[in-house]
Image: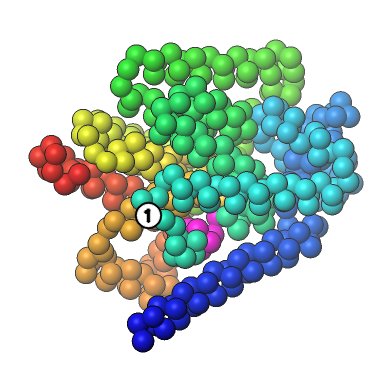
């Protein structure tokens, strides 16, 4: 009887896994079947690369729209990344748009499979099960799917970042720095993860940290001196991304909250308050995190470096002024790891029930608040995950050395 029950559970588990796999493959096929509807970010990369290859300005939306023969250029052809990223897309630009898109999607699917394998093998305490795969699919409003749909480079960025974290765990610091610099030349902000070096012991960390910064600055300087006009265009486009409202970032959330309070009537004052509040919150988070990292460094805890990486990933997500919905890929594993270890109390369950049950409320004041909470749910949940890590580190600091590890 026990054997039959165990066998039945095994068959059910395998069946569910097959269904999930078929669902994922069908989703990818569906996205690739409508190249004119999805993959809008790839469209920007592709036609920017073709414009650059033709000796034109890839940051000029009018130029890229003309190259793509597309009328709605303002929303579809804005290239906002450093010029070195275009070199990745120059080979693809030699192909037809449809062929390049399918090849790009295939590369991303292969890297995604490698990323999930790396997560399960090196960063999870237990062997990944069905709950982990489902969590990756649906948590934080499905950032993996959002990236595949948008055609962004987030999965490529995350693959290189987590390879860097893997080398960090193995103390192979040269490779760690190399795989931080690769995504940093694409989106700049991954350079912040070099700060992990300061929580290691030994003098070599300074050499790797400042050496990596020097290489990055030299790369941007070369970009500036070789193509000053393109560099100025890049800075102009990059500056516009910070003020984008439709993204679940702390900066955008503060803007929405100030708008609900009627601060839009005085734009100059509202902007000043907006910026001051953002920096105050960011500095507070960094101060608390720094203290937590110092405490963690002083303890000889199991998986200390993993906890450090996970904590820094959550901080990265909440303090960047520009953080798109697909960027929440970076907090999937940190959130899963801490939630597996945490035991939710009655208050947490009550708050979760109250939030979900009030999603459709029309109560005055409560309705706009719920709308904001749902729109920024990935950000709010990331703050929760950050708080759980800080609490866990604080609780470890109260345990005598050698106990509770």
Q: Position of residue 152 (x, y in %)?
A: 66, 46
Q: Position of residue 19 (x, y in %)?
A: 59, 73
Q: Is residue 181 visible?
A: yes
Residue labelled with disc 1: 126
166 vs 144, left or right, is: left
Q: Tell me if residue 40 comes above or below residue 48 in the rendering.
A: below
Q: Position of residue 274 (x, y in %)?
A: 43, 41
Q: Is residue 379 visible?
A: no
Residue appearing at x 70%, y 12% in the figure: 225
Q: In the orientation shown, which residue stands out farthest toward the left? A: 400
Q: Secondary structure at mark 1?
A: loop
Q: Which residues are magenta?
A: 136-143
Q: Tell me if residue 140 comes above or below residue 97 in the rendering.
A: below
Along the line of sight, which residue is nearer the eye, 173 or 141?
Answer: 173
Residue appearing at x 24%, y 39% in the figure: 301
Q: Residues within 10 Å of mark 1 (few under 14, many from 20)?
A: few
Residue appearing at x 60%, y 14% in the figure: 218
Q: Is residue 204 magenta?
A: no
Along the line of sight, which residue is nearer the eye, 343 or 382?
Answer: 343
Main secondary-structure element of the magenta-colored stretch: helix
Q: Position of residue 385 (x, y in %)?
A: 35, 51
Q: Quadrant of the C terminus?
A: top left
């Amino acid at each position: 009887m026990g054997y039959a029950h165990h066998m039945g559970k095994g068959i059910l588990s395998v069946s569910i896994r097959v269904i999930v796999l078929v669902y994922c493959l069908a989703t990818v096929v569906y996205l690739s079947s409508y190249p004119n509807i999805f993959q809008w970010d790839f469209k920007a990369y592709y036609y920017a690369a073709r414009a650059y290859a033709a000796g034109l300005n890839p940051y000029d939306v009018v130029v890229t729209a003309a190259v793509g023969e597309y009328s709605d250029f303002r929303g579809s052809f804005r290239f906002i990344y450093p010029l070195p990223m275009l070199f990745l897309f120059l080979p693809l630009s030699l192909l037809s748009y449809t062929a390049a898109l399918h090849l790009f999607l295939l590369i991303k699917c292969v890297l995604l499979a490698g990323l999930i394998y790396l997560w399960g093998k090196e960063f999870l305490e237990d062997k990944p099960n069905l709950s982990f795969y489902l969590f990756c699919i649906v948590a934080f409003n499905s950032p993996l799917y959002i990236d595949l749909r948008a055609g962004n480079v987030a999965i490529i960025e995350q693959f290189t970042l987590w390879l860097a974290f893997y080398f960090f765990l193995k103390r192979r610091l040269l490779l760690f720095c190399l795989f931080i610099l690769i995504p940093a030349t694409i989106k700049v902000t991954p350079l912040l993860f070099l700060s992990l070096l300061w929580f290691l012991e030994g003098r070599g960390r300074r050499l790797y940290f400042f050496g990596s910064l020097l290489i990055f600055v030299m790369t941007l300087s070369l970009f500036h001196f070789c193509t000053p006009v393109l560099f100025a265009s890049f800075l102009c486009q990059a500056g516009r991304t910070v003020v984008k409202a439709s993204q679940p970032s702390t900066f955008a959330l503060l803007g929405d909250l100030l708008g609900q309070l009627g601060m839009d009537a005085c734009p100059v004052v509202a902007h000043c308050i907006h910026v001051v509040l953002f920096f105050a919150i960011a500095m507070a988070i960094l101060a608390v995190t720094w203290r937590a990292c110092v405490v963690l460094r002083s303890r000889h805890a199991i998986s200390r470096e993993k906890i450090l990486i996970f904590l820094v990933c959550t901080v990265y997500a909440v303090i960047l002024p520009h953080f798109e919905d697909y960027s929440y890929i970076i907090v999937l594993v940190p959130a899963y790891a801490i939630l597996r270890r945490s035991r939710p109390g009655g208050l947490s369950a009550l708050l979760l029930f109250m939030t979900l049950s009030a999603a459709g409320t029309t109560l005055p004041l409560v309705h706009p608040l719920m709308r904001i909470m749902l729109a920024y749910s990935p950000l709010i949940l990331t703050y929760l995950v950050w708080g759980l890590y800080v609490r866990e580190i604080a609780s470890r600091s109260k345990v005598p050395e050698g106990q509770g590890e």
